[in-house]
Structure formats: C-alpha cells, structure tokens
Image (tube, rainbow, N blue to C red):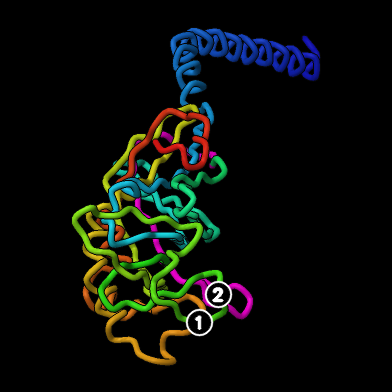
Amino acid sequence: MMDFTKAVKMNSTKNLYRMLGVLLCASLSGCADFEAPAQEGLRSASHTQAIMVTPEFAILGLEDVPAELFLTELGLSISEIRLQPVMSSSSGIAYSTSESFRLAFDVANGEDVKRLKPIEFPEAGRFVVSIRLEPCDKGNAKIPSLSLAGFVAGEGAVHTDPRAGSGEKFDGNPLPLPFEPKKDENAEDSDWTPFHYNSQRAVFYTFSDVELAPGEQTLNFTFDIQDWAVELIEPIVRAVRNVNGPDFGDGQGVDVTLQLESSGWGAEALMDSASVRTEPARPLPTSGSGR
C-alpha cells in the first residue's frame, strides 16, 4: 500500500499542475482579449497630449474712438478665469485660475495686447468661459476692478498740462504733451480736461463656449471699445462741468467714476463689448502694431 504521506504529496502535485494549467490558459485567452484594445491605448495616448492654453487680452477700436475723447490708460483687475465643461463625465467640475492679475494697457502709446503665461489644461472639450473683474488690495492701495484715464474735449473745460504741478490750470494751450488727439475738421477748437475712472464694482461675466483641443492654442479675449467710448463722452463732459474749484485738483484730473457708474457705462458696459474665441498659438504682436 502506498504510504499516505506520499499519496497526499502526489495528489497535491497533480492539483498544483492542474491549477497552473488553468492559469496559463486564462492568461493566453487574456492576451487575445487585449489585442483589440491596444489600438484604443494609442488613441488614449493621443487624448492625453498636453493641452496648453495661453490667455490673451486685446483692445480693438482705439483708432475709432471719437475725436472728443483721448484715452491714455485702461486697466483691468481679473480675479478669475473660469471654464465650465459643456458636457463632462466629471460631474460638471469647473476649472479656474487661482491667482488674480492686473492688466494695464498704455493705450496712449498704442499698447493694445496683453498675454499671460501658458496654462496646462487637464482635458479637451467645449467649455463655457467666464471672467470676474474684482478690486484687489496691494499694500495700502485699493486697486480698482476697471480703471480708465484720458482727456476729454468740451466747451468751457479746464485744461491741465500734465507737465505742470498738481492743480495748476491752463487755458487749453498748449495741448497736453506728448498727446496729440485727433481733431474733427468740422469742430471748433476745444479745451482738454484730464479725467479718471476707478471702479470698485465686482463684475462676473459669462461668454459663449469655446473648444479646447490637444496642443497649443490662444484663448483670446477681445474688447471692442468703439461704441462704448462714444457713450462715455456725455457723462464725462457732465462730470467736468459739475466740478468746481478745489474738487478738480487731485493730480489725475476730474474723477468721473460716479457719473459713469450711475449712467450705466461703467465696467458692465465694457464687458458687454467683449468676446472670446480660441486661435492657433502665435507670436505676440509688437506693441502698437495693431492686429
């Protein structure tokens, strides 16, 4: 009779071989199952290509601003750029920038484009784009959400030469240097008054949706200010007419913030002139060269 211990060992060995055979067959059948998904793996790799997005902000219409208005500076304080997937398997999670930033356009010298650093985006697809304008603190200073400065022409306006000290007044000659505002041939000579607008309003504005694709692209925000600038003239001139004596001299000219806000031509109106689109990545244009 075979020893019981040897029998157990032999049975155990046979069982082990059987188990190895089953596992080997399963692994071979598994290789066949994954031959087709190998193509899917290549497609998946292409979908994971880096999605690089460069936000760009551009001002259009500067050359079409009315002759009575000469803009020198325009500034935006943006606390957030948000992209909300139109359709997503990620429970509708929105992506947004984490740091606020300030855009200051020297429009008097033709600066009309500002570009941020590229952002690597986590997924491709269609996204609804929103931005938030919001005042921010910088040291002891309160930086406005939207700022604007320039000169307005108008009968009876007070002209201050920027070369002079704060509050020193002139009769309109010479014109502010180095500025040479466009002149309307049909208009009589007018005096020029410096003004500034500093909004403390927070504005959240939603644009249309855009398509983000794998690779490099520009997310272009465009502000076409031509129509907006036309509407600014009347409230700015009204503010200039209402100013008197010491209220004028703060070194920046007449504060027209209240008039623009109350007339509805402040930050919200500027945002109504804006649009967004994606474009192929391209070099940054030379400042003042136009678009």
Which residue sits at x=42%, y=55%?
A: 180
What is the quadrant of the N terminus in the image? top right
Q: Secondary structure at mark 1?
A: loop
Residue 97, given in percent of the width and then of the height, sits at: 50, 54
**CA separation in Å, label 1 and label 2:** 6 Å
Q: Is residue 276 left or right of residue 75?
A: left
Residue at image position (26%, 56%) is 66
Look at the numbered discs 1 and 2 and tell me whether their residues touch, using CB distance below 8 Å: yes
User: Residue sitting at 49 percent across and 61 percent down?
Assistant: 177
Amino acid type of the residue that numbered disc 2 sits on in the rendered structure: Ala
- Front position in the image: 250 or 131: 250
Task: Considering the whole magenta stretch, tell me its main secondary structure.
Answer: strand
- Label 2: which secondary element: loop
Residue beneath disc 1: 168
Q: Amino acid at mark 1?
A: Glu
Residue 128 visible in the current orientation: no
Image location (x, y in percent) of residue 270: 30, 60
Q: Which residues are magenta?
A: 119-146
Question: Does residue 229 appear in this view?
Answer: yes
Vertical order, 128 against 244 (above or below)? above
Say above or below: 201 vs 83. Answer: below
Q: Can you identify the residue that label 2 sits on?
A: 164
What's the mark number on residue 71? none
